[in-house]
Image (cartoon, grey):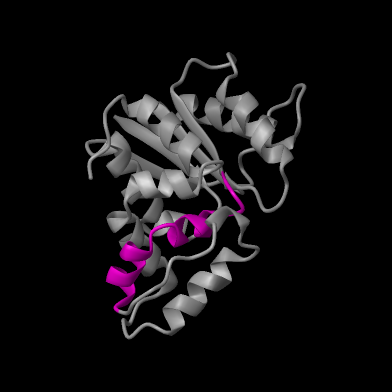
């Protein structure tokens, strides 16, 4: 199965998001990556708000590229309307292409903070349970601070890739119920399998 994966940042596209997709049922899928900010992809012309139209445009682009599914993930960044807009695009009948659209609350980096056991294993020191990840104002900075204390010689994107390869997905869904849980459900529906642990 060929899947177009569209996201915002380098951390998602450096293995972390692909690890999650594989663990959520896409182990045999082939992923092609692009950025949500790709200036060659213009918003869909029609009724609706910004991210709703952007997601629809990516659906049409995915069809044009001949892939079998679209994964589209953006950060909420404190703009709650994005959740509604992306949910509307997830439910749109404009395209029949299977899709998993999602919004990370507040941002993708928060998902890295859900499982302290995975963080401990990756960073090489005892990491305490973090506050509710979706309520952390700047999860990217928290991740950077945790990484700075680590004896491991990792870049932040490498840390994310390793955390997503080890994190307990049930804990991640429980601790990120507004962002990861619905996104994971959409991804599993696309791949129609149970996750591997």
In-image side of 158 versus 99 (left or right): left
Q: Position of residue 53 (x, y in %)?
A: 68, 30
Q: Is residue 110 magenta?
A: yes
Of residues 46 and 139, the one drawn nearer to the viewer in this rendering: 139
Magenta span main SS: helix
Task: Tell me the residue at 46%/62% (across/down).
Answer: 113
Task: Tell me the residue at 73%/47% (across/down).
Answer: 79
Q: Which residues are magenta?
A: 104-124
Query: In this rendering, is residue 137 above or below 81?
Result: below
Q: Position of residue 54 (x, y in %)?
A: 65, 35
Task: Tell me the residue at 58%/13% (across/down).
Answer: 93
Within the image, what quadrant is residue 149 found in? bottom left
Q: Quadrant of the N terminus?
A: top left
In-image side of 113 versus 76 (left or right): left
Query: In this rendering, is residue 126 above or below 165?
Result: below
Q: Position of residue 125 (x, y in %)?
A: 32, 79
- The answer to whether any part of residue 105 appears in the image is yes
Of residues 155 and 79, the one drawn nearer to the viewer in this rendering: 79
Q: Is residue 70 magenta?
A: no
Q: Quadrant of the C terminus?
A: top left
- The answer to whether any part of residue 9 appears in the image is no
Q: Position of residue 127 (x, y in %)?
A: 39, 73
Task: Tell me the residue at 73%/25% (across/down).
Answer: 45
């Amino acid at each position: 199965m060929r899947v177009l994966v569209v996201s915002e940042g380098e951390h998602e596209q450096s293995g972390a998001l692909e690890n999650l997709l594989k663990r959520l049922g896409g182990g045999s899928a082939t992923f092609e990556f692009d950025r949500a900010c790709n200036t060659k992809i213009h918003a869909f012309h029609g009724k609706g708000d910004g991210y709703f139209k952007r997601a629809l445009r990516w659906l049409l682009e995915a069809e044009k590229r001949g892939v079998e599914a679209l994964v589209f993930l953006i950060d909420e960044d404190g703009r709650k309307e994005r959740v509604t807009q992306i949910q509307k695009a997830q439910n749109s009948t404009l395209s029949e292409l299977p899709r998993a659209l999602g919004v990370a609350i507040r941002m993708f980096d928060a998902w890295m903070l859900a499982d302290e056991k995975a963080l401990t294993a990756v960073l090489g020191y005892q990491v305490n349970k973090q506050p509710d990840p979706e309520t952390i104002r700047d999860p990217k900075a928290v991740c950077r601070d945790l990484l700075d204390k680590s004896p491991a010689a990792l870049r932040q994107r490498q840390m994310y890739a390793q955390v997503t390869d080890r994190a307990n997905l049930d804990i991640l869904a429980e601790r990120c119920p507004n962002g990861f849980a619905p996104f994971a459900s959409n991804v599993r529906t696309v791949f129609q399998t149970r996750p591997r642990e």
